[in-house]
Image (cartoon, rainbow, N blue to C red):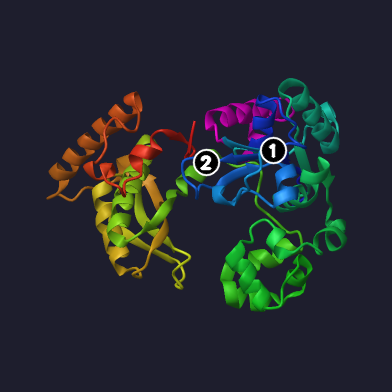
Amino acid sequence: MGEKAAMISNPYLSLSSVEAVERGLNPLKDMIAVVGDLSRRGSVVLAASPAIKDRYGIKTGSRLYEIPDDPRIYVVPARMALYIERSMQILNIVHRFVPAEAIQPYSIDELFFTTLHSERLFGSIHDVAMSLKRTVYKELGLLLAVGIGPNKFLAKVILDNYAKKTGLAAVTYADIPAVLWPLPIQDVWGIGRRMQLNLNRLGIYRLGDLAKAPLSLLRSRYGVIGEQLYYHAWGVDLSPVIVDPYAEARKGFSTGVTLMRDYNKLDALIVIYELTDQITAKLRRYRLAAFTVSLSIRYSNKEPMPGYHKSRTLYAASCLSVPFLEVLQQLLHASNDGLIRHISISVSNLVEESAVQLDLFDSAYHEKLRRLSRTTDAIQQRHGSAAILRAISLTDAGIALNKSHKIGGHYE
């Protein structure tokens, strides 16, 4: 917990500041909105400049149809290939100051890093942050915001609520009551809209209220999540910056999609087929197999019901779609009847693929499926994910063909 960690972000404003620099605009003064898909009125705003936030309240997560008809606003399509390139350039600059194992990417525009054991070379973490900001601006013309804290949670919260406005901000444990406790809970990393409403019902509106709430109450209501929220409110976060990526991969894989319209169960099954093919291809790429598969569903805002999440463990680990699809169809059938807006699946309880024991009577069938899957993998790796698809992906409910033209869920 005494490890020094820094949170790095491209503040003004991640993707919008990249677009501003590329277009010769002012990232602080010009009104810019980066939108995932300009052809869909309901497409999500991926980034918004400070000017459009201040004047119209347009922010990340807003919808295209919410952007007012103002000729001074630049509404631009997302260019994920460009953002990934800039992200990698910034990552390489950070690597000049700290070793690779001390860097943990968080998203396309944020990462954590620690200067532990490198202070003798480059000075304090504040010195590194300032050097990093100057280097990125000199070489890329981009403004970075840096939040500094004794752990990832504190670095992230100080970044989101202070550094993105000032460019640099730091917090210590002693600062928590005065600096962080007054924050509204909806402004705290890890607390979404649903949890905000749940906490509000308990009379918790600010981070300080959460810190003073009985731990036993939070634990009884929300289990391990309630316990984590309580300790976060006191600034306690034991998650490491330095992690073993191979160990992380062995915990499991997940993939999901937020749908562009409401789906019924029949349409949702098509998406489940496509997601299962994606995740089993990833298992085979890592030469792993999984025992457990999970299905998660979020319903449309039109539906009053909560989300659905169920898991089931197979009698034998697999890296093929067929065994998982049999289980996922059963889980989908057992879910509530309602309009669906988000689907995700995950696999866990992983083992080496070579350790999989095949049933004596089904071994020939599974070996045939394995060869077919490997052939499909080779074709897609060489010619792209759209080179070979299920026929159902060509229906209106299919997402795989459209997704194949995107990077990170958005067009290049």
Query: On the rendered structure, is 299 left or right of 158?
Result: left
Q: Is residue 22 above or below residue 309?
A: above
Q: Tell me the number on the disc at residue 211.
A: none
24 and 232: which is toward the camera:
24
Q: In this view, does 80 lie above or below 96?
A: below
Q: Which residue is drawn at 79% across and 68% down?
A: 208
Q: Earlier in the sequence, mark 1 or mark 2?
A: 2
Q: Tell me the number on the disc at residue 72.
A: 1
Q: Which amino acid does label 2 sit on?
A: Gly
Q: Quadrant of residue 82?
A: top right
Q: What is the span of residues highlighted in magenta in the rendered image?
A: 77-106
Q: Does the magenta stretch include residue 82?
A: yes
Q: What residue type is labelled 1?
A: Arg
Can you see residue 151? no
Residue under numbered circle 2: 36
Query: On the rendered structure, is 255 left or right of 178?
Result: left
Report the predominant secondary structure element of the magenta stretch. Answer: helix
